[in-house]
């Protein structure tokens, strides 16, 4: 017997190390998640829409002097090297399809 309190989830995009998915909660709220390695960031609908709108800007990002890319989500900064950044951009491109 299934528990009606469990959210219904759907994978939106996935790479080797990263994943984006959505959870339709029993209360009617939809929550989105980005799992970036060991970090998982959750988004409400409005925040997710902002992330999707920022994809063109993110694809034009350049690394800092140490060759690192940074992405910030509501007081959380995630730093990525070139390989991780490329994988992150692939995830975003898959989401934009």
Image (cartoon, rainbow, N blue to C red):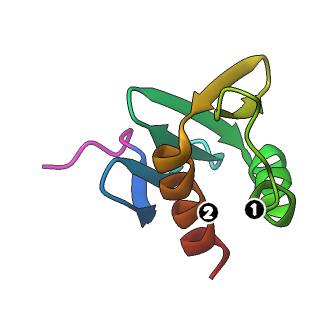
Residue drawn where x is 84% and y is 49% of the image = 46
Residue farthest along the top direction in this orientation: 75
Dot 1, crowdedness within 10 Å: few (<14), some or many (≥20)?
some
The mark closer to the camera, 2 or 1, is 1
Lateral position of residue 84 relative to residue 50, left or right: left
Give x and y (percent) for residue 88: 54, 53
Q: Quadrant of the C terminus?
A: bottom right
Q: Secondary structure at mark 2?
A: helix
Residue drawn where x is 74% and y is 51% of the image = 48
Q: Residue 9's mark?
A: none
Question: From which residue to which does the magenta span run?
Answer: 1-6
Give x and y (percent) for residue 96: 67, 74
Vertical position of residue 31 compared to residue 21: above or below: above
Q: Residue 92's mark?
A: 2
Residue drawn where x is 45% and y is 40% of the image = 35
Q: Are marks 2 and 1 in contact (CB under 8 Å)?
A: yes
Vertical position of residue 87 compared to residue 35: above or below: below
The image quarter in which residue 64 lies: top right
Residue farthest along the front direction in this orientation: 65
- 3 falls in the magenta region: yes
Give the main secondary structure of the magenta stretch: loop
Lateral position of residue 50 relative to residue 63, left or right: right
Dot 2, crowdedness within 10 Å: few (<14), some or many (≥20)?
many
Q: Secondary structure at mark 1?
A: helix
Q: Is residue 20 visible?
A: yes
User: Which badge, 2 or 1, comes first in the chain's sequence?
Assistant: 1
- 59 falls in the magenta region: no
Residue drawn where x is 83% and y is 66% of the image = 56
Vertical position of residue 7 compared to residue 64: above or below: below
Separation of marks 2 and 1 at Cα, in angstroms: 9 Å
Residue farthest along the left direction in this orientation: 1
Residue identified by numbered label 1 = 59
């Amino acid at each position: 017997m299934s528990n009606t309190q469990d959210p219904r989830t759907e994978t939106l995009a996935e790479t080797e190390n990263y994943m984006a998915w959505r959870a339709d909660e029993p209360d009617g709220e939809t929550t989105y998640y980005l799992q970036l390695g060991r970090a998982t960031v959750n988004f409400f609908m409005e925040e997710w829409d902002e992330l999707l709108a920022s994809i063109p800007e993110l694809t034009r990002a350049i690394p800092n002097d140490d060759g690192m890319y940074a992405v910030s989500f509501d007081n959380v900064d995630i730093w990525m090297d070139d390989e991780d950044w490329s994988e992150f951009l692939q995830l975003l491109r898959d989401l934009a399809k």
